[in-house]
Amino acid sequence: MEVQSRSIPTSLDGRFIITCWILGLGSLLSWNAMLTIGDYYYQLFPKYHPSRVLTLVYHPFAIGTMAILAYKEEKLNTRKRNLVGYILYFLGTSALLLLDLGTSGKGGLGNYIGICVVAASFGVADANVQGGMVGDLSFMCPEFMQSYLAGLAASGALTSVFRLVTKAAFEHSSNGLRKGVILFLAISAFIEFLCIVLYAFVFPKFPIVKYYRSKAASEGLKTVLADLAAAGITTPTQIGDDANNQVGRLSKKELFIKNIDYALDLNLIYVLTLSIFPGFLYENTGTHNLGSWYAIVLIAMYNALDLIARYIPLIKKLELKSRKGLMVAILSRFLLIPCFYFTAKYGNQGWMIMLVSFLGLTNGYLTVCVLTTAPKGYNGPEANALGNILMLCLLIGMCFGVALGWLWLIGNSDF
Protein backbone atom coordinates (compact mmCIF):
# COMPACT_ATOMS: atom_id res chain seq x y z
CA MET A 1 0.00 0.00 0.00
CA GLU A 2 1.56 3.30 -1.08
CA VAL A 3 0.66 5.24 2.03
CA GLN A 4 2.76 2.88 4.14
CA SER A 5 5.65 2.28 1.75
CA ARG A 6 6.95 5.83 1.78
CA SER A 7 10.09 6.55 3.80
CA ILE A 8 10.52 9.81 5.66
CA PRO A 9 12.70 12.37 3.85
CA THR A 10 16.08 12.61 5.55
CA SER A 11 16.34 16.41 5.59
CA LEU A 12 14.06 19.41 5.84
CA ASP A 13 13.26 20.99 2.48
CA GLY A 14 13.99 24.73 2.57
CA ARG A 15 11.42 25.29 -0.15
CA PHE A 16 8.76 23.72 2.03
CA ILE A 17 9.75 25.88 5.01
CA ILE A 18 9.35 28.95 2.78
CA THR A 19 6.00 27.67 1.49
CA CYS A 20 4.74 27.23 5.07
CA TRP A 21 5.89 30.77 5.81
CA ILE A 22 4.04 32.20 2.79
CA LEU A 23 0.88 30.28 3.66
CA GLY A 24 1.13 31.66 7.20
CA LEU A 25 1.56 35.12 5.72
CA GLY A 26 -1.65 34.71 3.72
CA SER A 27 -3.55 33.35 6.72
CA LEU A 28 -3.73 36.78 8.34
CA LEU A 29 -2.50 39.24 5.72
CA SER A 30 -5.93 40.53 4.68
CA TRP A 31 -7.11 40.99 8.26
CA ASN A 32 -3.88 42.74 9.24
CA ALA A 33 -4.22 44.92 6.15
CA MET A 34 -7.64 46.03 7.36
CA LEU A 35 -6.22 46.85 10.80
CA THR A 36 -3.15 48.61 9.41
CA ILE A 37 -5.17 51.05 7.29
CA GLY A 38 -7.01 52.06 10.44
CA ASP A 39 -5.66 55.61 10.08
CA TYR A 40 -7.58 55.87 6.78
CA TYR A 41 -10.77 54.49 8.30
CA TYR A 42 -10.48 56.92 11.22
CA GLN A 43 -10.40 59.72 8.66
CA LEU A 44 -13.52 58.39 6.91
CA PHE A 45 -15.44 57.30 10.02
CA PRO A 46 -14.10 59.37 12.95
CA LYS A 47 -17.08 58.68 15.23
CA TYR A 48 -17.49 54.95 14.59
CA HIS A 49 -14.40 53.58 16.44
CA PRO A 50 -13.36 51.49 13.40
CA SER A 51 -10.42 49.60 14.96
CA ARG A 52 -12.60 48.45 17.85
CA VAL A 53 -15.80 47.82 15.91
CA LEU A 54 -14.15 45.89 13.08
CA THR A 55 -12.37 43.57 15.52
CA LEU A 56 -15.61 43.13 17.45
CA VAL A 57 -17.38 42.12 14.21
CA TYR A 58 -14.55 39.85 13.08
CA HIS A 59 -14.08 37.67 16.14
CA PRO A 60 -17.61 36.33 16.76
CA PHE A 61 -17.69 35.05 13.17
CA ALA A 62 -14.23 33.56 13.60
CA ILE A 63 -15.16 31.85 16.87
CA GLY A 64 -18.55 30.61 15.66
CA THR A 65 -17.10 29.13 12.50
CA MET A 66 -14.10 27.69 14.34
CA ALA A 67 -16.35 26.05 16.97
CA ILE A 68 -18.35 24.29 14.25
CA LEU A 69 -15.24 23.23 12.34
CA ALA A 70 -13.45 22.02 15.49
CA TYR A 71 -16.48 19.89 16.40
CA LYS A 72 -16.66 18.39 12.90
CA GLU A 73 -12.91 18.35 12.17
CA GLU A 74 -12.52 14.58 11.76
CA LYS A 75 -15.11 14.56 8.94
CA LEU A 76 -13.89 17.63 7.06
CA ASN A 77 -12.00 17.86 3.79
CA THR A 78 -8.90 19.86 4.78
CA ARG A 79 -8.12 20.75 1.18
CA LYS A 80 -11.53 22.36 0.57
CA ARG A 81 -11.46 23.99 4.00
CA ASN A 82 -8.14 25.77 3.45
CA LEU A 83 -8.92 26.74 -0.13
CA VAL A 84 -12.26 28.23 0.96
CA GLY A 85 -10.40 30.30 3.55
CA TYR A 86 -7.78 31.66 1.16
CA ILE A 87 -10.40 32.36 -1.52
CA LEU A 88 -12.53 34.28 1.01
CA TYR A 89 -9.50 36.35 1.97
CA PHE A 90 -8.80 37.15 -1.70
CA LEU A 91 -12.42 38.06 -2.45
CA GLY A 92 -12.77 40.13 0.73
CA THR A 93 -9.60 42.13 0.04
CA SER A 94 -10.72 42.69 -3.55
CA ALA A 95 -14.12 43.81 -2.22
CA LEU A 96 -12.47 46.41 0.05
CA LEU A 97 -10.57 47.74 -2.94
CA LEU A 98 -13.65 47.85 -5.19
CA LEU A 99 -15.78 49.39 -2.42
CA ASP A 100 -13.33 52.23 -2.01
CA LEU A 101 -13.04 52.77 -5.78
CA GLY A 102 -16.81 52.56 -6.24
CA THR A 103 -17.55 55.13 -3.53
CA SER A 104 -14.59 57.38 -4.45
CA GLY A 105 -13.26 57.09 -0.92
CA LYS A 106 -16.31 58.58 0.76
CA GLY A 107 -17.50 57.81 4.27
CA GLY A 108 -21.08 57.21 5.30
CA LEU A 109 -22.95 54.49 7.12
CA GLY A 110 -23.56 52.33 4.03
CA ASN A 111 -19.84 52.19 3.20
CA TYR A 112 -19.05 51.41 6.84
CA ILE A 113 -21.55 48.52 6.90
CA GLY A 114 -19.97 47.11 3.74
CA ILE A 115 -16.54 47.17 5.41
CA CYS A 116 -18.03 45.42 8.45
CA VAL A 117 -19.43 42.68 6.20
CA VAL A 118 -15.96 42.13 4.77
CA ALA A 119 -14.55 41.98 8.31
CA ALA A 120 -17.09 39.23 9.11
CA SER A 121 -16.01 37.29 6.00
CA PHE A 122 -12.41 37.55 7.17
CA GLY A 123 -13.46 35.96 10.46
CA VAL A 124 -14.93 32.98 8.59
CA ALA A 125 -11.78 32.75 6.44
CA ASP A 126 -9.55 32.86 9.52
CA ALA A 127 -11.38 29.93 11.14
CA ASN A 128 -11.08 27.87 7.98
CA VAL A 129 -7.43 28.56 7.24
CA GLN A 130 -5.80 28.79 10.67
CA GLY A 131 -7.67 25.84 12.13
CA GLY A 132 -7.06 23.76 9.01
CA MET A 133 -3.36 24.61 8.67
CA VAL A 134 -2.53 24.29 12.38
CA GLY A 135 -4.41 20.98 12.55
CA ASP A 136 -2.54 19.76 9.47
CA LEU A 137 0.91 20.84 10.67
CA SER A 138 0.35 19.54 14.21
CA PHE A 139 1.20 15.97 13.17
CA MET A 140 4.28 17.09 11.22
CA CYS A 141 7.62 18.54 12.38
CA PRO A 142 7.59 21.41 14.93
CA GLU A 143 9.81 23.38 12.51
CA PHE A 144 6.93 23.48 10.04
CA MET A 145 4.58 24.85 12.68
CA GLN A 146 7.17 27.44 13.72
CA SER A 147 7.59 28.58 10.11
CA TYR A 148 3.83 28.85 9.62
CA LEU A 149 3.44 30.84 12.86
CA ALA A 150 6.32 33.10 11.83
CA GLY A 151 4.45 33.71 8.58
CA LEU A 152 1.39 34.72 10.59
CA ALA A 153 3.47 37.30 12.44
CA ALA A 154 5.14 38.38 9.19
CA SER A 155 1.70 39.30 7.86
CA GLY A 156 1.53 42.00 10.51
CA ALA A 157 5.12 43.14 10.01
CA LEU A 158 4.82 43.19 6.24
CA THR A 159 1.56 45.12 6.26
CA SER A 160 3.16 47.66 8.60
CA VAL A 161 6.14 48.07 6.26
CA PHE A 162 3.83 48.39 3.23
CA ARG A 163 1.74 50.95 5.10
CA LEU A 164 4.75 53.03 6.14
CA VAL A 165 6.11 52.98 2.59
CA THR A 166 2.81 53.87 0.92
CA LYS A 167 2.09 56.60 3.49
CA ALA A 168 5.53 58.13 2.92
CA ALA A 169 5.29 57.80 -0.87
CA PHE A 170 1.92 59.56 -1.15
CA GLU A 171 2.03 61.82 1.92
CA HIS A 172 2.47 65.06 -0.01
CA SER A 173 0.35 64.20 -3.05
CA SER A 174 -3.30 65.09 -3.52
CA ASN A 175 -5.50 62.60 -1.66
CA GLY A 176 -2.29 60.72 -0.82
CA LEU A 177 -3.67 58.68 2.09
CA ARG A 178 -6.31 57.09 -0.13
CA LYS A 179 -3.85 56.40 -2.96
CA GLY A 180 -1.57 54.59 -0.53
CA VAL A 181 -4.45 52.48 0.76
CA ILE A 182 -5.51 51.48 -2.77
CA LEU A 183 -1.99 50.33 -3.65
CA PHE A 184 -1.70 48.58 -0.29
CA LEU A 185 -4.93 46.61 -0.79
CA ALA A 186 -3.96 45.64 -4.35
CA ILE A 187 -0.66 44.15 -3.11
CA SER A 188 -2.51 42.26 -0.35
CA ALA A 189 -5.01 40.80 -2.82
CA PHE A 190 -2.17 39.59 -5.06
CA ILE A 191 -0.46 37.79 -2.15
CA GLU A 192 -3.72 36.08 -1.20
CA PHE A 193 -4.09 34.87 -4.79
CA LEU A 194 -0.53 33.52 -4.60
CA CYS A 195 -1.48 31.55 -1.47
CA ILE A 196 -4.43 29.97 -3.29
CA VAL A 197 -2.08 28.76 -6.04
CA LEU A 198 0.58 27.55 -3.58
CA TYR A 199 -1.83 25.55 -1.45
CA ALA A 200 -3.77 24.10 -4.38
CA PHE A 201 -0.86 23.04 -6.58
CA VAL A 202 2.44 23.13 -4.66
CA PHE A 203 1.98 22.37 -0.95
CA PRO A 204 0.41 18.86 -1.26
CA LYS A 205 3.16 17.63 -3.61
CA PHE A 206 6.14 18.07 -1.28
CA PRO A 207 7.58 14.63 -0.31
CA ILE A 208 7.60 15.52 3.40
CA VAL A 209 3.87 16.42 3.24
CA LYS A 210 3.05 13.23 1.39
CA TYR A 211 4.89 11.22 4.04
CA TYR A 212 3.19 12.76 7.07
CA ARG A 213 -0.23 12.80 5.49
CA SER A 214 0.15 9.17 4.39
CA LYS A 215 1.17 8.25 7.92
CA ALA A 216 -1.76 10.15 9.42
CA ALA A 217 -4.16 8.52 6.94
CA SER A 218 -2.88 5.06 7.95
CA GLU A 219 -3.71 6.04 11.55
CA GLY A 220 -7.29 6.83 10.56
CA LEU A 221 -7.25 10.54 9.71
CA LYS A 222 -9.84 11.21 6.98
CA THR A 223 -9.21 14.94 6.56
CA VAL A 224 -6.05 14.44 4.48
CA LEU A 225 -7.46 12.05 1.88
CA ALA A 226 -8.40 14.77 -0.65
CA ASP A 227 -4.94 16.31 -0.38
CA LEU A 228 -3.30 12.92 -0.88
CA ALA A 229 -5.43 12.38 -3.96
CA ALA A 230 -4.37 15.81 -5.27
CA ALA A 231 -0.75 14.70 -4.81
CA GLY A 232 -1.39 11.54 -6.83
CA ILE A 233 -1.50 9.11 -3.88
CA THR A 234 -4.35 6.62 -3.83
CA THR A 235 -5.62 5.35 -0.49
CA PRO A 236 -8.06 2.56 0.37
CA THR A 237 -11.56 3.92 0.88
CA GLN A 238 -11.84 2.13 4.22
CA ILE A 239 -8.66 3.66 5.64
CA GLY A 240 -10.50 6.16 7.80
CA ASP A 241 -13.20 3.72 8.88
CA ASP A 242 -11.06 0.87 10.14
CA ALA A 243 -12.31 0.09 13.65
CA ASN A 244 -8.77 -0.73 14.72
CA ASN A 245 -7.78 2.86 14.09
CA GLN A 246 -10.24 4.01 16.75
CA VAL A 247 -8.89 1.80 19.54
CA GLY A 248 -7.24 3.82 22.31
CA ARG A 249 -7.76 7.15 20.53
CA LEU A 250 -8.49 10.08 22.82
CA SER A 251 -11.77 11.91 22.32
CA LYS A 252 -11.88 15.70 21.90
CA LYS A 253 -13.04 16.05 25.50
CA GLU A 254 -10.14 13.95 26.77
CA LEU A 255 -7.68 15.90 24.62
CA PHE A 256 -9.01 19.18 25.98
CA ILE A 257 -8.78 18.01 29.60
CA LYS A 258 -5.22 16.68 29.16
CA ASN A 259 -4.17 19.96 27.55
CA ILE A 260 -6.35 22.43 29.41
CA ASP A 261 -3.32 24.39 30.60
CA TYR A 262 -2.13 24.89 27.01
CA ALA A 263 -5.64 25.93 25.99
CA LEU A 264 -5.75 28.43 28.86
CA ASP A 265 -2.26 29.64 27.95
CA LEU A 266 -3.31 30.61 24.43
CA ASN A 267 -6.55 32.11 25.68
CA LEU A 268 -4.79 34.36 28.19
CA ILE A 269 -2.02 35.39 25.78
CA TYR A 270 -4.58 36.84 23.39
CA VAL A 271 -6.97 38.20 26.02
CA LEU A 272 -4.19 40.54 27.09
CA THR A 273 -2.80 41.29 23.63
CA LEU A 274 -6.14 42.11 22.00
CA SER A 275 -7.28 44.23 24.94
CA ILE A 276 -4.45 46.58 23.97
CA PHE A 277 -3.81 45.95 20.28
CA PRO A 278 -4.96 47.70 18.15
CA GLY A 279 -7.78 49.76 19.73
CA PHE A 280 -5.81 51.18 22.66
CA LEU A 281 -2.91 52.12 20.38
CA TYR A 282 -5.16 54.11 18.04
CA GLU A 283 -7.43 55.79 20.59
CA ASN A 284 -5.76 55.96 24.01
CA THR A 285 -2.13 56.91 23.49
CA GLY A 286 -2.62 60.64 23.05
CA THR A 287 -0.90 63.06 20.68
CA HIS A 288 2.89 63.11 20.38
CA ASN A 289 5.70 64.43 18.19
CA LEU A 290 5.14 61.73 15.56
CA GLY A 291 1.65 63.09 14.86
CA SER A 292 -0.31 61.01 12.35
CA TRP A 293 2.60 58.56 12.16
CA TYR A 294 2.40 57.67 15.86
CA ALA A 295 -0.22 54.90 15.77
CA ILE A 296 1.29 53.43 12.59
CA VAL A 297 4.74 53.30 14.22
CA LEU A 298 3.30 51.61 17.33
CA ILE A 299 1.53 48.99 15.19
CA ALA A 300 4.73 48.46 13.19
CA MET A 301 6.87 47.98 16.32
CA TYR A 302 4.42 45.45 17.75
CA ASN A 303 4.35 43.47 14.50
CA ALA A 304 8.12 43.58 14.01
CA LEU A 305 8.90 42.27 17.51
CA ASP A 306 6.11 39.68 17.26
CA LEU A 307 7.79 38.35 14.10
CA ILE A 308 11.31 38.35 15.57
CA ALA A 309 10.14 36.59 18.73
CA ARG A 310 8.70 33.67 16.75
CA TYR A 311 12.21 32.69 15.69
CA ILE A 312 13.64 32.71 19.23
CA PRO A 313 12.39 29.15 20.05
CA LEU A 314 14.56 27.84 17.19
CA ILE A 315 17.43 28.36 19.65
CA LYS A 316 16.74 25.30 21.77
CA LYS A 317 18.29 26.77 24.92
CA LEU A 318 15.84 29.66 24.75
CA GLU A 319 12.74 27.54 24.09
CA LEU A 320 10.35 27.42 27.05
CA LYS A 321 8.86 23.91 27.35
CA SER A 322 7.86 23.76 31.03
CA ARG A 323 4.10 23.79 31.42
CA LYS A 324 4.35 25.63 34.75
CA GLY A 325 6.92 28.02 33.33
CA LEU A 326 4.63 28.91 30.44
CA MET A 327 1.72 29.61 32.75
CA VAL A 328 3.81 31.81 35.07
CA ALA A 329 5.20 33.79 32.13
CA ILE A 330 1.75 34.27 30.60
CA LEU A 331 0.14 35.40 33.85
CA SER A 332 3.04 37.79 34.46
CA ARG A 333 2.18 39.60 31.20
CA PHE A 334 -0.94 41.02 32.84
CA LEU A 335 1.35 43.42 34.71
CA LEU A 336 1.52 45.24 31.37
CA ILE A 337 -2.01 46.59 31.89
CA PRO A 338 -1.07 49.13 34.61
CA CYS A 339 2.16 49.84 32.69
CA PHE A 340 0.21 50.83 29.58
CA TYR A 341 -2.27 52.88 31.62
CA PHE A 342 0.34 54.98 33.40
CA THR A 343 2.55 55.30 30.33
CA ALA A 344 -0.37 56.61 28.24
CA LYS A 345 -1.23 59.05 31.01
CA TYR A 346 2.21 60.26 32.08
CA GLY A 347 4.90 58.79 29.80
CA ASN A 348 6.39 59.97 26.53
CA GLN A 349 6.29 58.21 23.17
CA GLY A 350 9.63 56.45 23.74
CA TRP A 351 8.30 54.54 26.74
CA MET A 352 5.12 53.63 24.85
CA ILE A 353 7.12 52.30 21.88
CA MET A 354 9.20 50.19 24.29
CA LEU A 355 6.09 48.76 25.95
CA VAL A 356 4.42 47.94 22.64
CA SER A 357 7.61 46.22 21.48
CA PHE A 358 7.66 44.08 24.63
CA LEU A 359 3.99 43.21 24.11
CA GLY A 360 4.77 41.94 20.60
CA LEU A 361 7.93 40.13 21.75
CA THR A 362 6.15 38.15 24.45
CA ASN A 363 3.10 37.48 22.27
CA GLY A 364 5.10 35.89 19.47
CA TYR A 365 7.51 33.94 21.67
CA LEU A 366 4.88 32.41 23.95
CA THR A 367 2.52 31.56 21.08
CA VAL A 368 5.20 29.51 19.31
CA CYS A 369 6.32 27.82 22.54
CA VAL A 370 2.77 26.64 23.28
CA LEU A 371 1.80 25.52 19.77
CA THR A 372 5.03 23.64 19.05
CA THR A 373 5.03 21.86 22.42
CA ALA A 374 1.38 20.91 22.92
CA PRO A 375 0.79 18.46 20.00
CA LYS A 376 3.82 16.27 20.76
CA GLY A 377 3.20 12.61 21.56
CA TYR A 378 -0.11 12.22 19.71
CA ASN A 379 -1.01 10.31 16.57
CA GLY A 380 -2.30 12.04 13.43
CA PRO A 381 -6.03 12.23 14.24
CA GLU A 382 -5.38 13.34 17.84
CA ALA A 383 -2.83 15.99 16.83
CA ASN A 384 -5.20 17.37 14.19
CA ALA A 385 -8.07 17.54 16.69
CA LEU A 386 -5.87 19.16 19.33
CA GLY A 387 -4.64 21.77 16.85
CA ASN A 388 -8.23 22.76 16.10
CA ILE A 389 -9.12 22.88 19.81
CA LEU A 390 -6.14 25.11 20.61
CA MET A 391 -6.96 27.50 17.77
CA LEU A 392 -10.55 27.74 19.01
CA CYS A 393 -9.26 28.68 22.49
CA LEU A 394 -6.92 31.24 20.92
CA LEU A 395 -9.79 32.86 19.00
CA ILE A 396 -11.99 32.93 22.11
CA GLY A 397 -9.17 34.73 23.91
CA MET A 398 -8.94 37.25 21.08
CA CYS A 399 -12.69 37.91 21.27
CA PHE A 400 -12.59 38.45 25.03
CA GLY A 401 -9.59 40.71 24.60
CA VAL A 402 -11.37 42.85 22.02
CA ALA A 403 -14.43 43.14 24.29
CA LEU A 404 -12.30 44.09 27.30
CA GLY A 405 -10.50 46.66 25.17
CA TRP A 406 -13.62 48.84 25.29
CA LEU A 407 -13.00 49.35 29.02
CA TRP A 408 -10.14 51.71 28.13
CA LEU A 409 -12.81 54.15 26.89
CA ILE A 410 -14.42 54.51 30.34
CA GLY A 411 -14.16 58.16 31.29
CA ASN A 412 -13.30 59.20 27.72
CA SER A 413 -15.41 62.24 26.90
CA ASP A 414 -15.53 61.26 23.20
CA PHE A 415 -17.04 57.84 23.86
Image (cartoon, grey):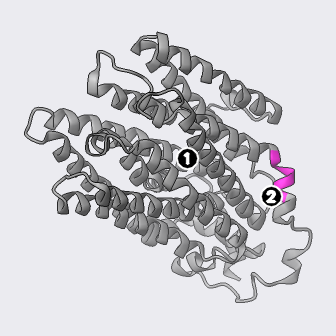
- Residue 78: x, y in percent? 59, 72
Front position among marks 2 and 1: 1
| Membership of 349 in magenta stretch | no
- At horizontal 69% and vertical 44% (from top left) the residue drawn is 267
352 lies above or below 224: above
- Residue 408: x, y in percent? 54, 30
Visible residue check, residue 13: no
User: Which residue is label 2 attached to?
Assistant: 378
Q: Which residues are magenta?
A: 255-260
| Res 244 → quadrant | bottom right
Q: Which of 23 and 408 lies nearest the eye of the viewer?
A: 408
User: Which residue is label 1 attached to?
Assistant: 149
- At horizontal 29% and vertical 63% (from top left) the residue drawn is 94
- At horizontal 72% and vertical 73% (from top left) the residue drawn is 74
Question: For the residue labelled by badge 1, is the local secondary structure a helix, a strand or a loop?
Answer: helix
Q: Give the CA separation, mark 2 to mark 1.
A: 20 Å
Q: Which of 109 and 74 lies nearest the eye of the viewer?
A: 109
User: Quarter holding the N terminus?
Assistant: bottom right
- At horizontal 12% and vertical 42% (from top left) the residue drawn is 175
Q: Which of 350 and 137 lies nearest the eye of the viewer?
A: 350
Compared across the picture, whether 294 is left or right of 362 comes to left
**Extreme residue in the bottom direction:** 237
| Res 312 → quadrant | top right
242 lies above or below 191: below
Q: Amino acid at mark 2?
A: Tyr
Q: Give the crowd class for mark 1: few <14, some 14-19, many >=20 residues within 10 Å.
A: many
User: Quarter holding the C terminus?
Assistant: top left
Q: Are marks 2 and 1 in contact (CB under 8 Å)?
A: no
